[in-house]
Amino acid sequence: MPLYRDEAVILRTHKLGESDRIVTMLSRDHGQIRAVAKGVRRTASKFGSRLEPFMVADVQLYEGRTLDTITQAETLGAYGAAIASDYDTYQVANVMVETAERLTDAEPARQQYMLLVGALRSLSQAEHPPGLTRDSYLLRALALAGWAPNFSECVRCGQTIPAAAGDSTAMVVQLGGTVCDDDAPPGSPRLSAASVDLLAMLLMGEWERAIAHPEAVRGPSHGFVSAYTQFHIEKDLRSLHFGA
């Protein structure tokens, strides 16, 4: 059976038999992989903690009929322990890997792999507040998948929407972002100018400006990101019901 090698981030695992695990990974060049790690649950396993969720590894596998088999694994990014040591960080990481699994099920996605690895690295090093890291990752992952939201123009008529302090803007998940008052459906949810600005900063990765927004602004922004993510993935993300 042919061997192949790739870099991969571990998305999730579940038990198989008495000592094995099935490992779901997002790889750099082969997309999503489901493979068996034999004997990994034994104390003397050669894999140790290299194949735990949130870890990044250089893996060697051989192809099987239904599941591939992992024969070697070397750690490239040891993020699991740091992430698991903090509850909010752990829940955010779960949102990330669940989203990545849903977005990359059908095809290779190197950019999604690189984005996820970078986000997990940042999360493990506590570079930014966990909730902001989560929302930035979700917006950027959806943009890579072809669902980039618009936070500056009306998604119906293209009119630029001024971001005057104290104003609120209609935000329609189903339409893809901001909608001017003339085109907004009746009863559309609205966000403050500050919350819309935060969303734009998170999408662009402008962290200095994003972190300057207070908690009162972050909550409504997160509500939009959660709704937008689940609308486009078309499934409920269980991990989004918990966390930071």
Image (spheres, helix red, strand yellow):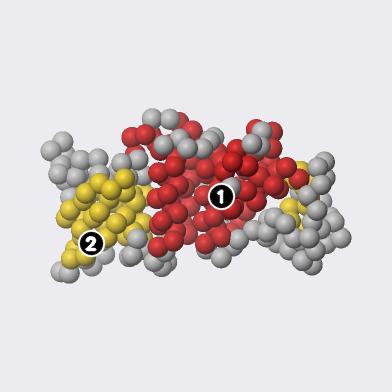
Considering the image in quadrants, where does the C terminus appear? Answer: top right
80 to 22, vertically: above or below = above
**Mark 2 or mark 1, which has the lower sequence index?**
2
Q: Is residue 36 visible?
A: no
Q: Residue at x 20, y 55 (%)?
A: 70
- Coordinates of residue 173 in the picture (x, y in percent): 68, 56
11 to 220, vertically: above or below = below
**Which element type, helix, strand or loop, lies under badge 1?**
loop
- Tell me the kind of residue under disc 1: Gly
- Coordinates of residue 189 in the picture (x, y in percent): 76, 48
2 vs 215, left or right, is left
Q: Are marks 2 and 1 in contact (CB under 8 Å)?
A: no
- The count of marks equals 2
- Coordinates of residue 67 in the picture (x, y in percent): 25, 61
Furthest residue in direction front, as rendered: 208
Q: Residue at x 18, y 50 (%)?
A: 38
Q: Residue at x 36, y 63 (%)?
A: 31
Place residue 213 in its image quadrant.
Answer: top right
User: Counting other residues with Cα less than 10 Å from the Cα at mark 2, is it few (<14), some (14-19), or many (20 or more)?
Assistant: some
Where residue 5 is drawn, which disc sits there?
Answer: 2
Q: Which residue is mark 1?
A: 205
Which residue is at the front of the view, 58 or 233?
A: 58
22 vs 213, left or right, is left
81 to 157, vertically: above or below = above
- Tell me the kind of residue under disc 2: Arg
Considering the image in quadrants, where does the N terminus appear? Answer: bottom left
